[in-house]
Image: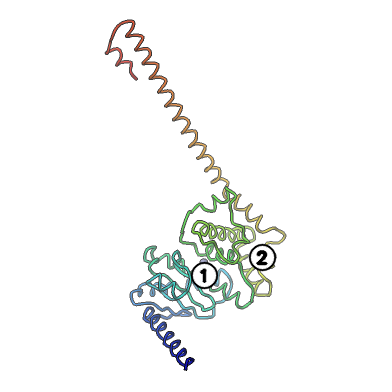
């Protein structure tokens, strides 16, 4: 009896949650390799997603060399809370999330409304890279570090900035880069460190492509498909180097002028400040001297206002 009651409660809960979800994402659009579910008010975004999807799909294939052969679902939300409830993820600062195991991309239309249609375009390209890398991981049983996963997505798709655009430059010049070993499974929670983690990840891929050629990302993916784990695939593409040290050298080389300018500007600011202080001291001394002279003249010649005014400043 107890088991039956539990089963009824479970079935009812499942029904209610399915009903709530169906009510939220009541409409659908379909295209080649894509199914889009959305609430009616998000119709405009659904049509845009349908239009942008073939490009995002092609972009993942071109970037990674992985053929997309499964249908992707895109769920559009008009409420951040509903998206958070369905994904179980903290999404307050995120426009979209990818769940490769379900071939699912979830998009927060409230943020797309604020940032414009290009943000949806960039996000779909970005999330399709995650879907494709997720498929690679599932097929090979090998993990790809998050810095590489996010790095490829950001480097190839562009990104909607969510913090200090100079986070990486500042970290390079203050020796506060996050070790890549700390960006393997997750990114920092704080928004400042998180922005730096994204910029670092993007720059590692820029470094790989700069040093080892346009096809180096695809070569790493191919080696993993052929049985290598990620470190071996990276070592084969970038042989005989300590990857992290070489990448740091590359980033430091990349920003010397900006670093110089920052130092120059701080020196310039300091020099200007000192000059202003020196000028104020000079004016004070000059005023004091003039007053002394006026006192002497009054003693010698009596009051003479006209003479005093002409000589005041
Ligand atoms: Zn991402």
Task: Please provide percent x and percent y for residue 85.
Answer: 44, 74
Locate residue 270 relative to residue 82 in the image: left or right: right
Q: Position of residue 303 (x, y in %)?
A: 28, 9
Q: Residue 26 appears at what percent x and percent y?
A: 37, 81
The secondary structure type at the circle numbered 2 is helix
Confirm or reject: label 1 Cβ below 8 Å from ligand 1: no
Toward the top, the furthest residue is 300
The quarter of the picture where the C terminus appears is top left
The colouring scheme, among rainbow, by chain, secondary structure or one colour, is: rainbow
Q: Residue at x 35, y 73 (%)?
A: 44
| Count of marks overlaid on the render | 2
Q: Would you say 17 lies left or right of 177 here? A: left
Q: How many neighbours does mark 1 have within 10 angstroms: few (below 14), some (14-19), or many (20 or more)?
A: some
Give the CA distance from mark 2 to mark 1. 22 Å
Decide: is 295 above or below 268: above
Given this view, does label 2 or label 1 mark the residue nearer the observer?
2
> Which residue reaches farthest right?
240
| Closer to the camera in the image, 218 or 263 | 263
Label whose residue precedes the other's in the sequence (2 or 1): 1
Residue 59, which numbered label? 1
Q: Residue furthest bottom?
A: 1
As drawn, the label of residue 212 is none
Residue identifier under label 2: 234
Q: Residues within 10 Å of mark 2 (few under 14, many from 20)?
A: many
């Amino acid at each position: 009896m107890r088991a039956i009651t539990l089963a009824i409660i479970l079935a009812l809960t499942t029904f209610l949650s399915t009903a709530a979800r169906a009510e939220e994402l009541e409409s659908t659009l379909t295209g080649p390799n894509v199914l889009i579910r959305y609430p009616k008010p998000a119709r405009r975004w659904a049509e845009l997603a349908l239009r942008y999807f073939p490009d995002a799909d092609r972009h993942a294939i071109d970037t990674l060399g992985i053929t997309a052969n499964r249908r992707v679902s895109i769920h559009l939300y008009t409420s951040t809370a509903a998206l958070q409830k369905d994904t179980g993820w903290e999404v307050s600062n995120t426009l979209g999330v990818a769940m490769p195991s379900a071939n699912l991309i979830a998009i927060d239309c409230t943020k797309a409304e604020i940032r414009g249609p290009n943000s949806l375009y960039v996000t779909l390209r970005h999330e399709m890279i995650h879907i494709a890398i997720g498929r690679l991981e599932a097929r090979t049983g090998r993990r790809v570090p998050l810095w590489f996963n996010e790095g490829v997505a950001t480097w190839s798709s562009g990104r909607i900035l969510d913090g200090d655009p100079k986070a990486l430059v500042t970290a390079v010049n203050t020796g506060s880069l996050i070790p890549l070993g700390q960006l393997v499974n997750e990114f920092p929670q704080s928004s400042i460190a998180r922005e730096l983690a994204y910029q670092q990840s993007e720059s590692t891929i820029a470094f790989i492509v700069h040093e080892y050629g346009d096809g180096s990302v695809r070569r790493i993916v191919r080696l993993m498909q052929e049985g290598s784990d990620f470190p071996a695939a990276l070592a084969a593409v970038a042989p005989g180097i300590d990857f992290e040290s070489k990448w740091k050298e590359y980033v430091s080389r990349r920003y010397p002028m900006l670093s110089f300018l920052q130092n120059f500007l701080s020196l310039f600011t300091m020099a200007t400040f000192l000059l202003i202080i020196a000028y104020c001291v000079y004016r004070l001394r000059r005023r004091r001297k003039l007053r002394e002279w006026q006192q002497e003249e009054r003693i010698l010649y009596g009051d003479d206002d006209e003479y005093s005014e002409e000589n005041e400043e």
